[in-house]
Amino acid sequence: MDARTLLLERNSHGKLEGPAPEASQLDTLYRAALRAPDHKGLTPWRFVEIVGEGRARLGELCARAERARKPDVSEGKLDSIRQKALRAPLIIAVIAKVVDNAKVPRVEQVVSAGCAAHAMLYAAQLEGLGAMWRTGDFAHHPIVREGFGLSPIDELVGFLYIGHKTGHDKRLPVLDPADFIERWD
């Protein structure tokens, strides 16, 4: 796949199946992530691979968070939440491991971790894998944050669901760059 095609045709894939990516494919994803912009070389990223029974553990963590948020939540809703963590054979939690630095503000470090996640999505496409970036309320819930060992200034940037594509690629919207550009002359 040439770079232009990759950049212009990357697509999210919500329907994923096993097996999990091979070690060489994962190596490509992580190497791409480590090329993200990184002011002062702080490497403000941390990646948590969630596979096998770890996915059930993530589902249970999210169910606990939901029960804390809504004590009267139904068991059916909790089961639905637990099942969401089983939608892909691999989930990578991308965490901004923020370093206290006078020259590199927190927001820049969080954006850097977001760039790392973005690079991983492109790398997954390059490797013939499907991927989707999910976040949602659980990424910010105190119970989930504690489960991942986040400090108060860290940020769970998102969950990358990665596997093999099933079904067809979704149709990409046609956007005109001019609609998003403001020019100062």
Image: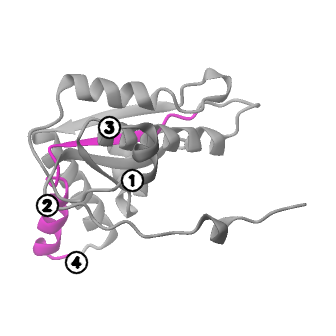
- Residue matched to label 3: 126
Q: Nearer the viewer, mark 2 or mark 4?
A: 2
Please tell me in which quadrant of the rendered image residue 24 appears: top left
Left or right of 123 on screen, residue 82: left
Q: Residue 123's spot in the image, x, y percent?
A: 36, 36
- In the image, residue 2 sits, relative to residue 170, either above or below, namely above
The answer to the question of whether label 3 and label 4 lie on touching residues, with beta carbons closer than 8 A, is: no
Outermost residue toward the right in this view = 185
Disc assigned to residue 167? 2
* Alpha carbon distance from label 3 to label 2: 18 Å
Q: Residue 41's spot in the image, x, y percent?
A: 61, 21
What residue is shown at x 18% (from left), y 34% (from top)?
Answer: 21
Disc assigned to residue 9? 1
Q: Secondary structure at mark 1?
A: helix
In the image, which residues are magenta?
73-98
- In the image, residue 157 sits, relative to residue 101, either above or below, namely below
Work out whether mark 3 precedes mark 4 in sequence or the reverse, and give the earlier one: 4
Work out whether mark 3 precedes mark 2 in sequence or the reverse, and give the earlier one: 3
The amino acid sitting under disc 4 is Asp
Work out whether mark 2 precedes mark 4 in sequence or the reverse, and give the earlier one: 4
* Alpha carbon distance from label 3 to label 1: 11 Å
Pick the residue in front: 89 or 170. Answer: 170
- Residue matched to label 4: 72
Q: How is the image coloured?
A: one colour
Label 4 Cα crowd, 10 Å radius (few <14 / some 14-19 / many 20+): few
The amino acid sitting under disc 1 is Glu
Label 1 Cα crowd, 10 Å radius (few <14 / some 14-19 / many 20+): few
Instruction: Specify whether residue 96 is painted magenta.
Output: yes
Instruction: Specify whether residue 61 is painted magenta.
Output: no
